[in-house]
Amino acid sequence: MRGSVKKRPSGWSIVYDLPKKWDEKRQVFVRNQKWERVPPPNNRKHAEKLLAERLSRLNRGDIFEPTKMLLEEYKNLWMERYAEVEGIAVSTLSQYEYLFRVHIIPALGQMELMKIGSEDLQMFKASKLKKGLSPQTVKHMTRLIRQMLTHAVDWGYIQKNPALRVKHPSVIRREMDAFSPQETSQMLQSVSGQWYSLLLLAVTTGLRRGELLSAKWTNVDWEGGRYIVKETLHDCKDGLPVFGAPKTRASNASVDLTPACISVLKQHRMSQAKDRLAAGQDYQDYDLIFATAIGTPFSPSNVVRRVFHPALKRAGLRRIRFHDLRHTCASLLIAQGENPKYVQRQLRHASIQITFDCYGHLFPEVGQEAVRRLDVALKLEA
């Protein structure tokens, strides 16, 4: 930090730099100086001593210029300056907006940023849990607040992040569920048309919901019997699809298609061609494999509510998450004895460790048989 002493007509003063502040009009950080008149004795020696004390306190972080900015105002700045320009997924941004609008801003939005303390945030967390919100949902909120206030410290709005002293709620990891081969067949028998094609791909390829609903015909390798995953559907906003990159870098890869899948897709493509002719100029061609009668993508949430859950009910099956169809794919592959490395590749895990962490308990125990084979190899007798 810089500073100096100045002789003015009214006497000696000191001037020193505070942390830079944000100029909303110019959209840049600007120099932030503070002037202080030197109290008696008003002379150069006392001014130099006072300046040295102020600069020392500044270096220790003991001096801070308070801001009266409200959390709601800061939230808008944070979204514009960070969240919306840092490549955060559209689905995540939508979740942020929902948490702000419904939970965070109504409770904390009119508090001054500088005056929010750990106790306020602890009370906020406790109130949400008491209202019956899931620990996972409340964790999303506390994590979002912590992230925002970390940037507030970096940008010089507050000195310390009070959210660091508030623990995230403990979340009990939900056990994955998977259908048996018989249950999978029951589910598939309860649907027809393109929904049969979609659910068949889900349980044989392990594709995620967004990846299925963004699947394009140009990404099908008919000769190689593969589908190449290049994007995912986040949601439909203002009637337009919002596509983005797959969940992880490893997800951008190909998956094998069974011969039955290829046959079903060919039949579905012919059926879709009839829809395109019937719609005429109203057809919006996104090249989607799974699309409405006019070519537009389906809403991911609507597919679950209006297709997947009713299909499970018709089949007399328990309700599982759509994502559990991915787990079903893994369990079916493991049950038929596929190599763990192949399971990793088909599910597009970044490493074999992830596969074992998720599904290690499904692989057959071969310990005793393996050590018996050692005895045979070494020609040993018990």
Image: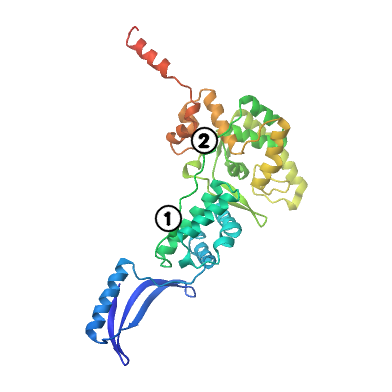
- Whether residue 166 is visible: yes
Residue 322 at x, y percent in the picture: 62, 39
On screen, residue 46 above or below 238:
below
Q: Which residue is mark 2?
A: 347
Which badge, 2 or 1, comes first in the chain's sequence? 1
Q: Residue furthest top?
A: 381
Q: Point out the image quarter for the N terminus.
A: bottom left
Label 2 sits on what residue type? Leu
Q: Point out the image quarter for the C terminus.
A: top left
Residue 20 at x, y percent in the picture: 39, 72
Q: Which residue is mark 1?
A: 164
Disc number placed over residue 141 in the picture, else none: none
For mark 2, give the secondary structure: helix
Q: Specify whether 137 is left or right of 239.
A: left
Cα gap from disc 2 to disc 1, whole angstroms: 36 Å
* Mark 1 Cα shell of 10 Å, populated few (<14), some (14-19), many (≥20): some
Q: Specify whether 46 is left or right of 209.
A: left
Give the quadrant of residue 48.
bottom left
> Mark 2, mark 1: which one is toward the viewer?
1
Q: Nearer the viewer, residue 67 or 26?
A: 67
Residue 172 at x, y percent in the picture: 52, 40
